[in-house]
Image (spheres, grey):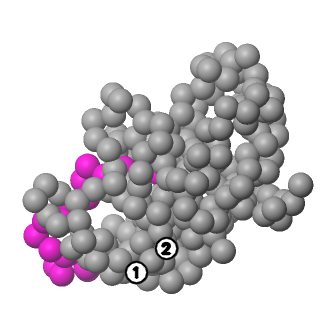
């Protein structure tokens, strides 16, 4: 069953309308989902909430549920004969992309490509052991999920695939939340909860530089063909 994700953030060229871009990308999802390892996908429109780390400022997200190791799925995607079978528009090289392979941090449930997602990209501060950061954040993500409007959470280790080299910092971890209220209400509820919970936070905790994105679905979750089907 899908445990890991492949996230592709993108911004279309300036001369390509959102309508044209979305028509093409909706077809492109199907071209990806026939590849081994890609189980399902959903597309989202993005709003950067805070931060400047990659993938801030991107306008769209294509999220893929993966079966097995992300490295194997990425190897299938990079095969030379794959791109030759895809219908890529002439403006495809002008799209700005950022992508990550997302490895589950032992989440108790499978990630759910819900209608509304909230993504937080983070990295442990210098000098902090990564395992300590992961362990603490597991509890912190659950703490956030107790806030009104937050339904579920999943944590991932990130491996960059396509990254803007000019980004001031690169996240190493992702907290993915399923949410069900508008962005203003979610932020207000988080800030209110922070006032109550921050007394128990470790001294090294500083989310100021982290990047957060709000993602609203622009289509249904699409499943690929059964693995092994021709």
| Marked residue nearer the N-terminal end (1 or 2) | 1
Q: Residues within 10 Å of mark 2 (few under 14, many from 20)?
A: many
Disc 1 residue crowd, few under 14, some 14–19, many 20+, Cα 10 Å = some
Spot occupied by residue 105 in the image (x, y as percentages of width and height): 42, 72
Of the pair 95 and 85, the residue shown nearer to us: 85
Q: Position of residue 203 (x, y in %)?
A: 10, 70
Magenta residue span: 194-213
Q: Say which residue appears at 68% left-offset and 50% top-offset.
A: 43
Q: Residue lying farthest right? A: 230
Give the alpha-carbon distance from disc 1 to disc 2, as whole Å: 7 Å
Quadrant showing the N terminus? bottom right
Total residue callouts: 2
Which residue corresponds to mark 2? 153
Image point 26% across, 49% down: which residue?
A: 209
Residue at 41% x, 51% y is: 159
Q: Is residue 162 left or right of residue 115?
A: left
Query: For residue 138: magenta?
Result: no
Q: Is residue 196 left or right of residue 113?
A: left
Q: Which residue is mark 1?
A: 142
Image location (x, y in percent) of residue 28: 77, 39
SS category of the residue bearing label 1:
helix
Q: Nearer the viewer, residue 111 or 196?
A: 111
Question: Which of the 4 quarters of the picture holds residue 127?
Answer: bottom left
Of residues 7 and 208, the one drawn nearer to the viewer in this rendering = 7
Per the image, label 2 sits on a secondary structure element best described as: strand
Q: Is residue 108 visible?
A: yes
Q: Name the residue: 49% across, 73% down.
A: 153
> What percent of the width, then of the height, locates residue 73?
61, 53
Q: Is residue 148 visible?
A: no
**Disc 1 and disc 2 in contact, CB within 8 angstroms:** yes
Which numbered marker is on residue 76?
A: none
Check if residue 203 falls in the magenta segment.
Answer: yes
């Amino acid at each position: 069953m899908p445990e890991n994700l492949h996230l592709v953030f993108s911004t279309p060229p300036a001369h390509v309308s959102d309508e044209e871009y979305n028509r093409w990308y909706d077809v492109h999802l199907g071209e990806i989902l026939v590849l081994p390892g890609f189980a399902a996908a959903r597309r989202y429109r993005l709003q950067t909430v805070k931060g400047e780390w990659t993938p801030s400022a991107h306008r769209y997200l294509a999220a893929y549920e993966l079966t097995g190791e992300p490295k194997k799925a990425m190897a299938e995607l990079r095969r030379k004969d794959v791109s030759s079978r895809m219908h890529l528009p002439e403006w495809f090289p002008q799209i700005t992309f950022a992508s990550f392979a997302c490895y589950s941090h032992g989440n108790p449930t499978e990630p759910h490509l819900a209608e509304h997602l909230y993504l937080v990209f983070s990295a442990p501060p210098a000098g902090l052991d990564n395992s300590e950061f992961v362990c603490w954040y597991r509890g912190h993500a659950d703490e956030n999920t107790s806030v009104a409007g937050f339904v579920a959470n999943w944590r991932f280790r990130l491996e960059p695939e396509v990254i803007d080299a000019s980004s001031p910092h690169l996240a190493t971890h992702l907290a993915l939340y399923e949410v069900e209220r508008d962005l203003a209400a979610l932020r207000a509820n988080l800030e209110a909860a922070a006032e109550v919970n921050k007394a128990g936070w470790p001294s090294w905790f500083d989310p100021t530089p982290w990047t957060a994105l709000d993602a609203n679905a622009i289509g249904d979750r699409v499943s690929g063909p059964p693995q092994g089907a021709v």
